[in-house]
Amino acid sequence: MTAAEVKALPVGEKFRIMEAIWEDLRDRFERSEIPQEHKDLLDLRRARVESGDAQLLAWDEVKSSI
């Protein structure tokens, strides 16, 4: 399917396709192994937040600051 064909689809059909793609990606992600270096990075970031060395920001807050 080309980009032009996708653009021509009704919105409802686009949503159905998007949902199917997200479901497929979620299933693939759940079956895949996360590399140890990614786990380590996430653990480091979590520890920085918990220690107060880093701060979590809401996505809307980040978008409005750009």
Image (cartoon, helix red, strand yellow):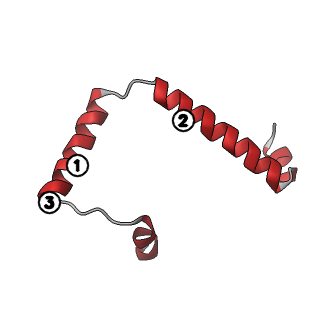
- Tell me the amino acid under the disc marked 3: Asp
Residue 34 percent location from the top left of the image: 37, 28
Q: Which residue is mark 3?
A: 53
Estimate how packed mark 2 is, as few (under 14), some (14 to 19) or many (20 or more) residues with alpha carbons within 10 Å: few
**23 lies above or below 5:** above
Q: Please identify the quadrant where the N terminus is shown.
A: top right
- Inspect the image, locate mark 2, and give the three-letter code of the amino acid beneath it: Arg
List the residue tagged with mark 1.
46
Q: Secondary structure at mark 1?
A: helix
Dividing the image into 4 quarters, which one contains the C terminus?
Answer: bottom left
Q: Amino acid at mark 1?
A: Arg
> Position of 32 compared to 1: left or right?
left
Separation (CA) of disc 2 from disc 1: 23 Å
| Residue 26 circle label | 2
Q: Is residue 63 left or right of residue 40?
A: right
Q: Earlier in the sequence, mark 3 or mark 1?
A: 1
Drawn side of residue 42 relative to residue 62, left or right: left
Q: Position of residue 19 (x, y in %)?
A: 67, 43
